[in-house]
Amino acid sequence: MVFIDAMLDSTGPTVLQRSHGLARIMLGSRGLIDLAQAGSAKVMMPHVVGKCPEIVFLNTSGGMASGDRLEYHVGMQAGCRAVATTQTAERAYRANDCPARAQIRLTLGAGSWLDWLPQETILFDGARLERMTRVDLGPGAGCMLLEMIVLGRQAMGERLSHLHLHDRREIWQGGRIIHHDALSLSDAALPRLQDPAVLNGAKAMATLAVIASHAPDLLGCARAVLDEPGVTAAASAPPGRLILRLLASDGWPLRRQINRLLGALRPDPLPRIWQV
């Protein structure tokens, strides 16, 4: 009876279970070399005949809340090519305490190529998310990086009044940073998102970066398809990079524009998990 009473006691502090997940995959010239996963993070390689190998990450917790931890790692030996994505949109839920933290680590051997094309991240009102993406490129390696963010649940008409977001992407090669991109949003910044010089009222945004010696040559091809209704976009091509910024009224026109861009810039079809 003492044991039952202890179970029913609600006078003590409430300790909520936190979600921790780690998924790691390594590819070689002949395919999969190593795969490890723990907690809420899973990784799969769907069998795709005659196409670029696909890696699909999954967070089985259904989203990220206060104190959650999530890590995705991809390693590729020399000369490999692959595309990595997520099974569905990631969701950052309201967090009253410490932020959720996500870490993505992509390590590419000499001459290898990875398209990192996760589906969008949806930020709920009150979300607290800190995310770090680091790419380490070997000699002659290159990558394409996509990040899509949707501010609030559009179908519910949600408007964000509280938010904590720190999102960083770093690309390293030869012991130095060759590309750095960071986004930080807080409660104080939310009223200014309507300003024409900021988001101009957009509810969805994306950054697409191609890092390779031939990347600037893709500028004209990219600009030729930046005409999706409801999307404002711009492209630039500093040495060794192609950078695109996109804003949209909601996630659907943004996704349509991204699909067209990927079709123009990549030799391979979209990841199968993206097909609707």
Image (cartoon, rainbow, N blue to C red):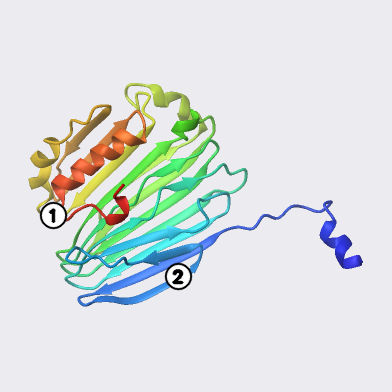
| Measured Cα–Cα span from mark 1 to mark 2 | 30 Å
Left of 268 or right of it: where is 27?
A: right
Image position of 141 with respect to 150: above or below: below
- Residue 267 numbered tag: 1
Would you call the spot at circle 1 few (<14 residues within 10 Å), some (14-19), or many (20 or more)? few
Residue at 26% in and 55% down: 271
The numbered mark at residue 120 is none
Above or below, 229 relative to 182: above
SS state under label 2: strand
At x 32%, y 67%, the residue is 45
**Which secondary structure, mark 1?**
loop
Point out residue 217 in the picture as x, y percentages from the top left corner.
7, 46
Residue at mark 2: 37
Seen from the viewer's position, the closer of residues 72 and 242 is: 72
Position of 72 with respect to 163 (left or right) is: left
Cβ–Cβ below 8 Å for labels 1 and 2?
no
Q: What amino acid type is highlighted by mark number 2?
A: Gln
Q: Nearer the viewer, residue 22 or 57?
A: 57
Which quarter shows the N terminus? Answer: bottom right
- Left or right: where 20 falls relative to 53: right
The x and y percentages for residue 12 are 81, 54
* Residue 7 versus residue 196 in the image, above or below: below
Position of residue 106 in the picture relative to residue 71 (left or right): left
Q: Could you tell me residue 164's position as x and y percent? A: 50, 40
Hey, which quadrant is residue 139 in on the image? bottom left
Specify which label sits upstream in the sequence, 1 or 2. Answer: 2
User: How far across and down, in percent of the image, does residue 19 sit?
Assistant: 56, 59
For image coordinates 46% across by 24% down, the residue present is: 191
- Disc 1 marks a residue whose amino acid type is Pro
